[in-house]
Image (spheres, rainbow, N blue to C red):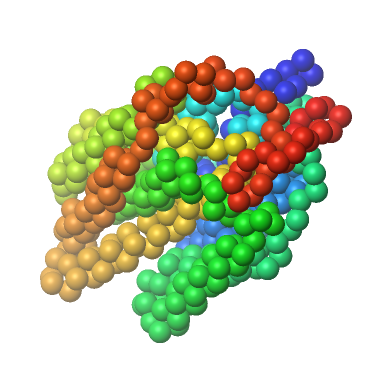
């Protein structure tokens, strides 16, 4: 096993195990809500907090955790995150009541926040430029697969062995990933001491908490004055955070503004948020339709969504390699169009008694779309980011991904509840009201994907911007020096730890 230590592909497998668990737990819980209500004697409000506690903690702490990885080494933070996440999964699986489960889910979110940003940092550090696109393509495919396969795997587990196993299934995966981390992943350490921006951390945490909590809980509190006050406070704190960061660009900021000088990183950061909104905008109402209108079991509803996951999983690695060869711009434009077409097809096919197999062509189409989007999106975001800024870039990218999921869940939840209430008030049956709700709700993800398609037009396709001697596939990788956080340029030589790895 030791001969594989430091092997980039072995490292990628290890990182993907941990990354998959954390994103799977964002969506796997949704399909188990009815069973958790019955099993714990909980209210719907309490059970929804089982979902929210995890997503909220994860969203709020990502930027802080990415900075801690820069300071203490990404492998150490990844391993710590695995330990916290696995122990919290055990606590979730044996939770005696709703309050205990909600608390354990919050701790799970902490573990996920510790490990998620380190995955991209380590990939950029261990892979040479010629293979980085393929590696990030696989990483992105894992992200899409985890999000889409949650309902399918959750449905199988809930129906076969009970809802507690949606948490306990993480335990063997977490233990295996932890063992492999210490056997295979190199201990990359910063070549010099890093500063910890406590004021920036507090401002970022408060900003993200106010925004994420307000968006997640807005519908529950009927978008009253308290929610709007919270969102306004979040906006004000965001301005304060940006002003604080502007004054620290020469002293290791949490968010180096130099990242956004790369047009592709900026566009991909916007796109990752839009795609996250679109994914939740489809999965949540479609899953509810399958169970509440067509009266499918959790397992059958999950299996209806399976073709999308399988196709995207198969296509993702190829899309990552194609992104290296021809650039990701046109792949993503094609994927966004396919994904939007698949969502539209689902809406047109959905009826009061539609057979499950009628959805297969449409779900295959969404799978093709996701497969063409997610892998190149990760590749293009990190293509021109120097390794010394990879931690900050990963923190920003993953934070936007999670905030997009929060916005998507909040927006589609508000639309579903509003449209459903209006339909029932107008005298429609529940099934008829929900069907009309599905037909109108899909306008959200389709519109968001069209905005993303237009944003992709701004991407600089790397195959058209090369000059002799600057092809990233042939340029040798040199261990990075210490970086000026304002520009990302090396300012001095660095020395590494015993295993020779540096950041």
Measured from the top left, where is residue 457 in percent x and y?
29, 40
Q: Residue at x 69, y 33 (%)?
A: 480
Q: Foreground: 199 or 458?
A: 458
Q: Residue at x 28, y 64 (%)?
A: 415
In the image, taking residue 493 as reference, residue 438 lies left or right, namely left
Measured from the top left, where is residue 113 in percent x and y?
62, 51
Residue 499: quarter of image: top right
Quarter holding the N terminus is top right
Count of numbered circles on the image: 0
Measured from the top left, where is residue 302 in percent x and y?
38, 40
Q: Residue furthest right?
A: 498
Quarter holding the C terminus is top right
Q: Residue at x 43, y 67 (%)?
A: 215
Q: Is residue 405 above or below residue 315?
A: below
Say whether residue 439 is visible: yes
Q: Foreground: 287 or 126?
A: 126
Q: Is residue 413 above or below residue 169?
A: below
Q: Is residue 32 above or below residue 12?
A: below
Q: Residue furthest bottom?
A: 225
Q: Foreground: 432 or 75?
A: 75
Say whether residue 90 is visible: no
In the image, taking residue 226 as reference, residue 417 lies left or right, namely left
In the image, taking residue 454 as reference, residue 168 lies left or right, namely right
Q: Residue at x 32, y 59 (%)?
A: 412
Measured from the top left, where is residue 285 in percent x and y?
30, 53
């Amino acid at each position: 096993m030791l001969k594989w230590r430091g092997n980039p592909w072995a490292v990628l497998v290890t990182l993907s195990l941990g990354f998959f668990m954390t994103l799977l737990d964002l969506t796997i819980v949704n399909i188990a809500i009815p069973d958790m209500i019955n099993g714990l004697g909980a209210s719907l409000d309490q059970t929804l907090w089982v979902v929210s506690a995890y997503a909220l903690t994860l969203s709020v702490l990502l930027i802080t955790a990415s900075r801690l990885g820069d300071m203490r080494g990404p492998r150490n933070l990844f391993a710590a995150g695995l330990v916290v996440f696995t122990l919290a999964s055990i606590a979730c699986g044996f939770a005696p009541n709703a309050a205990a489960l909600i608390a354990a889910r919050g701790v799970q979110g902490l573990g996920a926040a510790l490990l998620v940003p380190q995955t991209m940092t380590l990939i950029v550090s261990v892979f040479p430029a010629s293979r980085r696109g393929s590696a990030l393509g696989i990483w992105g495919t894992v992200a899409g697969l985890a999000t889409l396969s949650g309902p399918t795997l959750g449905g199988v587990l809930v129906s076969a062995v009970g809802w507690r196993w949606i948490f306990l299934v993480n335990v063997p995966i977490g233990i295996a990933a932890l063992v492999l981390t210490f056997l295979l992943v190199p201990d990359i350490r910063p070549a010099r001491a890093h500063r910890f921006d406590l004021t920036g951390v507090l401002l970022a945490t408060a900003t993200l908490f106010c925004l994420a909590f307000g968006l997640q809980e807005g519908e529950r509190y009927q978008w009253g004055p308290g929610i709007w006050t919270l969102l306004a406070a979040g906006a004000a704190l965001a301005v304060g955070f940006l002003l604080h960061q502007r004054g620290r660009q020469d002293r290791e900021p949490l968010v180096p503004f130099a990242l956004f000088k790369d047009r592709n990183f900026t566009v991909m950061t916007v796109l990752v948020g839009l795609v996250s909104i679109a994914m939740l905008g489809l999965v949540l109402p479609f899953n509810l339709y399958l169970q509440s209108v067509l009266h499918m079991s959790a397992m059958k509803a999950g299996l209806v969504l399976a073709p999308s996951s399988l196709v995207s999983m198969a296509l993702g690695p190829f899309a990552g390699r194609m992104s290296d060869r021809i650039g990701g711009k046109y792949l993503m434009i094609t994927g966004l169009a396919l994904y939007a077409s698949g969502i539209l097809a689902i809406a047109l096919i959905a009826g009061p008694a539609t057979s499950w197999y009628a959805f297969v062509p449409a779900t295959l189409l969404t799978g093709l779309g996701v497969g063409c989007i997610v892998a190149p999106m990760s590749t293009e975001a990190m293509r021109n980011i120097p390794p010394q800024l990879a931690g900050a870039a990963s923190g920003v990218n993953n934070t936007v991904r999670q905030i997009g999921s929060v916005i998507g869940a909040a927006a589609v939840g508000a639309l579903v509840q509003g449209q459903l209430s209006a339909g029932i008030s107008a005298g429609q049956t529940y099934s008829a009201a929900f069907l009309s709700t599905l037909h109108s709700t899909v306008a959200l993800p389709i519109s968001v994907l069209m905005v993303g398609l237009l944003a992709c037009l701004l991407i600089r396709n790397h195959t058209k911007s090369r000059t002799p001697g600057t092809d990233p596939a042939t340029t040798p990788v040199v261990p990075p020096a210490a970086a000026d956080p304002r520009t990302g340029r090396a300012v001095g030589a660095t020395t590494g730890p015993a295993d020779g790895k540096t950041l």
